C-alpha cells in the first residue's frame, strides 16, 4: 500500500517541483463573491499551474463562506486536480487546508468529509487536542495529515513559542515539542508539519527536531518569507522534505503559469546550489 | 448593543437553566446516514428540549459529513432554533461547535460562514494560532467565541497540561495560561472557554484563572464527568458562568424532553444547595 508521503514523493520526482499551489479564492480577488466565481478562479489556476505543482492546497474557509454551493465548488476543484493528473499521467495530491481538530467520532466525521466526500489526500490539523484527535485521520492509512506547528502569523508567538518543560528539566518552545511528538507519531509515514517561512530560525529548529518529516511551508512571498533562507533552513539531507506553498504570488501574477514555473525553477536552482 | 454573553445571561434567566443541548447526529444514531436523517434527528431534539435549553450546540462535523446537503441541514436546524425562540418569546443562542482556527482573511471567511451564512451566535475556536486568529471573530461584536482550553478527552494532556513558563519564572499548565489570556482579552464581553467536566481539579484551576468568563462544559454523563463536582468546581460567585453541555444523555433518552427537564432541575437543585 502506498502511503501519502510516498505518493507525494513520487509526484515531486515526476515534476521536479517542491511547489504547492495554494487555492485561496479571496472574495476580494473575485469579480463577485460567489461560489461560481471561486470555482472559476481555482479551475483557471489548476489548469495553468498543474504541470509545475507538486501539490494543490485549497483553503476550506473560502468555500464554506458560500454554504452548500461552496461545498460543491470545492469538490469540483478537487475533481479538476484529478482530471489534470490524468491528463499529465502523474497524480497530484490535494491537501485540504481546513485546520480541523476534534475528538473521537467527531474527528472520524471530519476525516470522512475530507477524504471520502471531498476526495482530498491530506488535511491540515490543529494539534491542541492531542494525539487521540489525530488518530481517526491516521486510521485512513493512505491519507496524510499536516499538524500546525509554527505558523507564519504574528500571533503564532502567543502559544507556539512558549517555553514548555518536558520531563524533569528539558525546556523547549512548544512548537519544537510538537515537532518531536510528530516525529515519534509518524510510524505510518503519514504525518507532516505546517511550519511558516517567516521565521527561518524556527524552521531550522523544527527541522532539527523532526529530521524525517515533510513540512508544508506558507509565508514565502506575500507574507515576507525568503525562499532561499527557507530552503536552507528546512530542506532535509535528501534535498526534499519541504512543500513551498505560494498562493497570491501565483494567483495575482499577470501570468500564473509563468509565475509557477519560475517559482519551481527558483527552487530547483537553490536546491542545486545547496547540494554543490 | 447587546453582547453575546449578555444575550446568553438573559436566556439563562428566562429559562432558569444552565443546560446546553448538544446536537450531535452521530451516523450510528440515525436510521440512515443521510443529511435528511441528521436534520430530522436534530429538529425533534430542538422541539422537545427548547423550553429547558439555555443554548443549543450543533456539531459541524456531523453535517459536513454529508457535503452540501449537510450544510443545508445545519442551516435549517439553526433556523428551527430561531423559530422555537419566537414561539417561546425568548431567544435561545446557538453555539456552532466547529473548533476552527486560522488567520487574517481566512478567519474572516470562517466568521462570515458561521455568523452570517449559518446564523450562529457563537463558535468554538482553537487558540493554537494566537490572538490574531481570534480577532476577526471578535470583530463581530454581538457574537461570541469559546476558546478550547481544557478538553475532556484523554489526549488533552499531550499539550494542554504541559508546564509553560510565563515571564521569568511563573510556571503554569498551558490550559491555565490560555484561561489567563482569555480573561485579559475579554474586553468586549465575547470570549468564553471550553473546559471539560472530566477533570474537576482542572475546572477549578481554570475558574481561578478566569473568574469572570463563561465556560462551555462538555463531558458530564457519557464521558464520566460528575455534574455536582463540575458545578462546585466551576460556578462563578454569582451562581452562573457554566453551560453544561449534554448530547447523548438527552438524545438517546427514551424521553428527551424529560431528560432535559431533569437535567435542568438537577442543576437548579445543586445551585440552590451551593448557595445555602
Image (spheres, coloured by chain):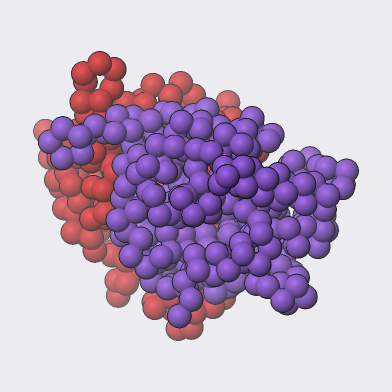
Chain colours: A purple, B red
**Residue in view at x 51 percent, y 31 percent:** A199
**Residue in view at x 42 percent, y 73 percent:** A141
Q: Residue B181 at what x, y percent from top left?
A: 37, 26
Q: Extreme bottom residue here?
A: B31
Q: Quadrant of the C terminus of chain B?
A: top left
Q: Residue A152 at what x, y percent from top left?
A: 54, 35
Residue A223 appears in which quarter of the rendering?
top right
Considering depth in this image, is B88 or A188 the residue closer to the camera? A188
Considering depth in this image, is A64 or B12 the residue closer to the camera? A64
Q: Say if residue B102 shows up in the picture.
A: yes
**Residue in view at x 66 percent, y 67 percent:** A14
Q: Residue A26 at what x, y percent from top left?
A: 73, 44
Q: What count of labels does the image hold?
A: 0
Asked if residue B167 lies left or right of residue B64, the reply is left
Asked if residue A199 lies left or right of residue B206, the reply is right
Q: Extreme front residue here?
A: A276
Considering depth in this image, is B46 or A103 the residue closer to the camera? A103
Asked if residue B85 lies left or right of residue B233, the reply is right
Q: Residue B120 at what x, y percent from top left?
A: 55, 48
Residue A106 appears in which quarter of the rendering?
bottom left
Residue A135, relative to residue B211: is it above or below? below
Q: Quadrant of the N terminus of chain B?
A: top right
Q: Say if residue B190 shows up in the picture.
A: no
Asked if residue A236 lies left or right of residue B274, the reply is right
Amino acid at each position: 500500500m502506498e502511503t501519502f508521503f510516498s505518493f507525494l514523493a513520487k509526484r515531486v520526482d515526476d515534476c521536479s517541483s517542491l511547489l504547492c499551489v495554494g487555492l485561496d479564492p479571496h472574495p476580494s480577488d473575485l469579480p463577485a463573491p460567489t461560489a461560481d466565481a471561486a470555482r472559476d478562479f481555482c479551475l483557471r489556476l489548476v489548469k495553468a499551474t498543474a504541470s509545475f505543482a507538486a501539490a494543490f492546497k485549497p483553503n476550506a474557509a473560502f468555500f464554506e463562506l458560500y454554504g452548500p454551493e461552496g461545498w460543491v465548488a470545492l469538490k469540483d476543484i478537487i475533481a479538476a486536480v484529478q482530471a489534470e493528473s490524468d491528463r499529465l499521467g502523474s497524480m497530484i495530491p490535494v491537501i485540504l487546508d481546513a485546520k480541523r481538530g476534534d475528538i473521537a467520532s467527531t474527528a472520524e466525521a471530519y476525516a470522512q468529509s475530507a477524504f471520502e466526500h471531498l476526495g482530498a489526500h491530506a488535511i491540515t490539523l490543529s494539534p491542541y487536542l492531542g494525539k487521540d484527535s489525530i488518530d481517526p485521520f491516521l486510521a485512513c492509512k493512505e491519507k496524510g495529515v499536516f499538524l500546525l506547528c509554527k505558523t507564519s502569523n504574528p500571533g503564532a508567538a502567543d502559544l507556539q513559542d512558549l517555553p514548555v518543560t518536558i520531563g524533569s528539566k528539558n525546556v523547549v518552545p512548544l512548537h519544537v515539542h510538537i515537532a518531536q511528538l510528530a516525529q515519534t507519531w509518524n510510524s505510518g509515514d503519514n504525518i507532516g508539519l505546517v511550519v511558516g517561512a517567516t521565521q527561518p530560525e524556527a524552521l531550522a529548529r523544527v527541522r532539527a527536531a523532526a529530521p524525517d518529516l515533510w513540512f508544508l511551508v506558507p509565508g514565502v512571498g506575500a507574507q515576507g518569507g525568503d525562499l532561499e533562507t527557507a530552503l536552507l533552513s528546512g530542506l532535509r539531507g535528501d534535498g526534499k522534505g519541504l512543500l513551498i506553498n505560494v498562493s497570491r504570488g501565483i494567483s495575482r501574477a499577470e501570468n500564473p503559469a509563468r509565475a509557477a514555473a519560475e517559482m519551481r525553477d527558483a527552487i530547483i536552482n537553490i536546491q542545486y546550489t545547496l547540494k554543490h
